[in-house]
Image: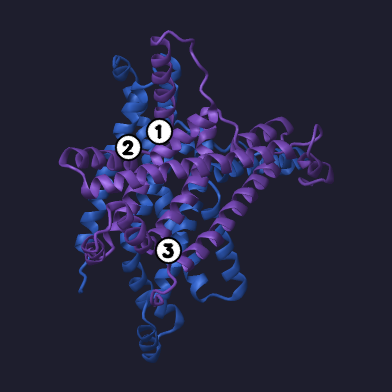
Chain colours: A purple, B blue
Amino acid sequence: MFFAAANIGLLAFGNTGYGDELFWGAVRTVQIAVFAYAFGIILGLCGAMGKLSGGKTLRVVLDLYTTLFRAVPELVLILLLYYAGTDSLNKLVTSLGFERIELNGLVAAVFVLGFVQGAYQTEVLRAAIQAVPVGQTEAGKAYGMSPFLRFRRITLPAMLPYAIPGLGNLWLGIVKNSSLIAVVGFTELALATRQAAGVSKQYLLFFLVAAAVYLTITMLSNQLFGWLERRVRRGQPKLA
Amino acid sequence: MRWDWLPFYFPMLVHGLYLTLVLLVVSVVLGFILAVPIGLVQATGPAPLRYLARGFCTFVRGTPLLIQLWLLYYGIGSLFPTIGLAFPGFKENFMWLIRLDAYYYAIVAFTLSYAGYEGEVMRGAFLGVPRGELEAARAFGMSPWKVVSRVWFPRAVRQVLPTLTGETIDQLKSTPIAFTIPVMELMGVTSRIRQDTFLTYEPLLFLALVYLILTFILTRAFGYVEAQIPTRR
């Protein structure tokens, strides 16, 4: 009685249904997650390097970054960074004598989520790099490898088996946390679903569909990361 | 920076803190109680129960809590008035269900979420208990129930305790999501202050500080509890 055949028509594409709205919402969700994840990895790599080989001041700053950003709820950080980021950008732009700009929602979302993600990435990557025996990089040094070559040939392949499980969890986390962007009014999957549900009054149907879409994304991701882990572990002794 | 709003809204914030903490404690305690059978059934239960428990954990861990909360509050919650319209008897007897406050939906959603995450952890912990200990318990003639209550469960819980800290802090950091279905916990009060005073940052910064303190206290408390449990290495 709640899933009458007519209701399923609401999922159609085009003017009669919300199928296309949900589809583009899902695309937006994946876009945000991928870009924010990439941004987070870059921040995380820099952060891990800084923590392991930076000076005292840099280490204190990075410790503050990872501690604060991992202790405060994502939703609060997203709201703070979203308003602070767009505000300070506009202050900068107007002080230079330009018109106020409306920041692209996607860019803001990626920046905000990526910045939060970076704190978690820093810790995962730092732990993974530290797990690589020092002797291996020292051997690279002894052979006269440049720092970059040492990172690419020794540290990176040796740390990946330790990093991939953590990186996988962070990816799942960012797919799920991307839904929090709905709170600042950016139409990704969660908000698109809520709008469609609100207009049609078919809340149960639409939220079940959204849950199924998220579940599909996360389950496919699990497969991908499982494959990645097997690949970077090849040649290593089997886990118990 | 303006902080003159703080004294006026302070009682409201204290009430918000109370709601946040009750939501956290109730969902963690009930969620953990639920997680034990969910984990046990996955480790040893009959196939239908095992698949049900595994499916539940996959669903909870694979979808955002925000969607779970909306599914429960807007989705399931909107069914009750519909049923009430169709069956007058239901409306008479279950008016409380139709009028149920959003806060209870939040408690149910957060409990189920915690149970899903922790159920998966409990499954691993139950499977991680050395087989020999269970066999020894059986050899002493313990009933299956007694094996669980005297050996299997106590051993598994001890393994799980360190992960409990992280899961509980994650749960604390999820509580602001409850404001999206109107619950006036800390985040709800903060967004109300922001609407009333037109201040963008100050209430959010204050909220961040409160959560920082809560996380710190929670970490310390769990560390203390963990230190009390004797371990031999």
x and y percentages locating residue A91 in the rendered image: 39, 14
Q: Residue A139's image quarter? A: bottom left
Q: Which residue is mark 2?
A: B211
Subunit under mark 3: B
x and y percentages locating residue B213 in the rendered image: 26, 38
Mark 3 belongs to which amino acid? Answer: Val
Q: Which residue is mark 3?
A: B121
Element at label 3:
helix
Give me the C-alpha separation between circle 3 and circle 1. Answer: 27 Å
Relative to the observer, which residue lies in front, A8 or B136?
A8
Give me the C-alpha separation between circle 3 and circle 2. Answer: 25 Å
Callout 3 and callout 1 share a chain: no
Mark 1 belongs to which amino acid? Answer: Val
Q: Residue A25's image quarter? A: top right
Determine whether A226 is above or below A97 in the image.
below
Determine whether B44 is above or below A161 in the image.
below
Q: Is residue B223 left or right of residue A200?
A: left
Determine whether A99 is above or below B68 in the image.
above
| First in residue order: circle 3 vs circle 2 | 3
Mark 2 belongs to which amino acid? Answer: Tyr
Q: Which residue is mark 1?
A: A76
Q: Give residue B126's mark.
A: none
x and y percentages locating residue B212 in the rendered image: 29, 38
Give me the C-alpha separation between circle 2 and circle 1. Answer: 9 Å
The answer to whether residue B181 of the structure is visible from this angle is no
Disc 1 crowd rating (10 Å Cα; few below 14, some 14-19, many 20+) is many
Relative to the observer, which residue lies in front, B155 or A20?
A20
Relative to the observer, which residue lies in front, B117 or B91?
B117
